[in-house]
């Protein structure tokens, strides 16, 4: 990727220069007579550019004023929304762990591990027998009570004998309930011999291997969720009260150069650190898995009411070591317009400060009085072909300026 960018940085200026040179030759051929100089009073190129400067072919767009909320940039990282260390719930030998690190899993369906069910099967048989025995004992006690009650009616049994047997029935019924509860517990253990993924996601760590003996609570694998991801950033205390749950925020995924939008989902009220910052999470769609936990991000958080800002396309901004600038196409001024052709626009470099991003555009602020005059709403800015431009250089538009809808 780096080689392609380096090649593009060389090829694009060369193509722009050649296109501009050919355009200039064509302009002179059609406008001049016998090779006479055309354009400025001093015989310069069309559009009044400096002597000997060939036109450059560029793509352009319009600067637009928009009602936007101001934003502040905070550096952070992507974090998973959910992370779970899945543990064994029953004791036994591990028979299979059919997943590997990086494997996708489906909640409630993907098998993470299988545990030997021999001992659970024996417990199941034992508890089933205990339930059957308790049921038989209870049935007999109920019959005995019925028989004694008949004898009591015939005055052939004592009341105490009947009361004792009724108490025995209650005891046997309780014993049966306990046996049924134990049977239900053993059945649940049998179900948990197969360990399933708790939610949709990916396996990030595998702890247990086949043949290992596990007890309840022993770790098997670690899983993180997919579908959504959080951009987490530590926000300074002087702006934390300006951020609210549900605010829309823009997040630039730095390794991908990808701007995405999300919603403020968490504002942690605990700022227990020496930097006096508060963790804020912006919930994002993971873009089909492209956004991965750990990626570095710049989070643009809204920190004030709407106001009017001048915006330009992101590609219109050129970044230097410690400066930012935008190339503006100024209308040309023909010294001798008798040929009837419109003058060529010329390039003007305007120093700006990038305030914040908004979708595929950025809000900018010119830094000089001359820049504020040149870069206004409706100004034409260069979005492609600015490499190698010089102030005053004539420009040829590869396409007409496209207004922002």
Image (cartoon, helix red, strand yellow):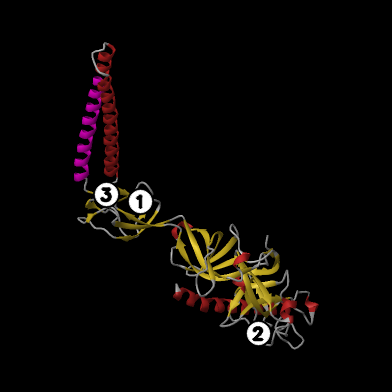
| Nearer-N-terminus badge (3/2) | 2
Q: Quadrant of residue 384?
A: bottom right
Are the residues tagged 1 and 3 within 8 Å (C-beta)? Answer: no
The residue under the point 21% across, 34% down is: 130
Point out the stretch of residues depicted in magenta: 118-144
Magenta-span inclusion, residue 119:
yes
Q: Is residue 272 left or right of residue 122?
A: right
CA gap, disc 1 and disc 3: 16 Å
* Mark 1 Cα-neighbour bin, 10 Å: few <14, some 14–19, many ≥20: many
* Mark 2 Cα-neighbour bin, 10 Å: few <14, some 14–19, many ≥20: some
**Residue labelled with disc 2:** 53
| Nearer-N-terminus badge (2/1) | 2
**Residue labelled with disc 1:** 197
Q: Position of residue 240 (x, y in %)?
A: 59, 67
Nearer the viewer's eye, disc 2 or disc 1? 1
Magenta stretch: dominant secondary structure: helix
CA gap, disc 2 and disc 1: 67 Å
């Amino acid at each position: 990727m780096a080689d392609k960018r380096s090649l593009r940085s060389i090829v694009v200026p060369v193509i722009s220069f050649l296109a501009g040179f050919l355009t200039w030759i064509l302009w002179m051929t059609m406008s001049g007579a016998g090779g006479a100089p055309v354009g400025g009073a001093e015989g310069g190129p069309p559009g009044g550019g400096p002597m000997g400067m060939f036109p450059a072919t560029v793509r352009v767009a319009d600067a637009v004023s928009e009602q936007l909320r101001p934003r502040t940039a905070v550096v952070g990282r992507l974090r998973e929304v959910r992370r779970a260390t899945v543990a064994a719930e029953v004791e036994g030998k591990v028979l299979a762990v059919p997943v590997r690190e990086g494997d996708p899993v489906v909640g409630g369906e993907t098998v993470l591990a299988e545990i030997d069910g021999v001992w659970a099967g024996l417990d199941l048989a034992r508890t089933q027998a205990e339930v059957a025995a308790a049921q038989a004992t209870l049935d007999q006690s109920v019959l005995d009570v019925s028989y004694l009650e008949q004898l009591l009616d015939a005055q052939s049994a004592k009341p105490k004998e009947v009361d004792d047997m009724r108490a025995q029935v209650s005891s046997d019924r309780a014993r049966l309930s306990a046996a049924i509860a134990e049977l239900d517990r053993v059945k649940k253990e049998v179900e948990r011999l197969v360990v399933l993924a708790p939610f949709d996601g990916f396996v990030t760590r595998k702890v247990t291997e086949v043949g290992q003996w596990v007890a309840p609570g022993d770790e098997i694998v670690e899983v993180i969720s997919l579908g959504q991801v959080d951009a987490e950033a530590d926000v300074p205390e002087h702006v934390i009260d300006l951020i609210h749950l549900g605010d829309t925020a823009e997040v630039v995924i730095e390794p991908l150069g990808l701007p995405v939008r999300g919603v403020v989902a968490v504002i942690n009220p605990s700022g227990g650190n020496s930097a006096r910052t508060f963790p804020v999470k912006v919930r994002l769609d993971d873009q089909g898995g492209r956004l991965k936990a750990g990626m570095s991000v710049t989070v643009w958080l809204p920190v004030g009411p709407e106001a009017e800002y001048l915006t330009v396309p992101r590609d219109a901004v050129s970044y230097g070591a410690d400066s930012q600038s935008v190339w503006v196409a100024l209308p040309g001024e023909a010294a001798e317009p008798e040929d009837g052709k419109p003058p060529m626009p010329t390039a003007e470099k305007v120093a700006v400060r990038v305030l914040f991003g908004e979708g595929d555009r950025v809000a900018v602020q010119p830094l000089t009085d001359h820049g504020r005059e040149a870069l206004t709403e409706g100004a034409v800015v260069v979005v492609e072909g600015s490499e190698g431009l010089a102030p005053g250089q004539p420009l040829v538009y590869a396409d007409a300026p496209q207004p922002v809808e």
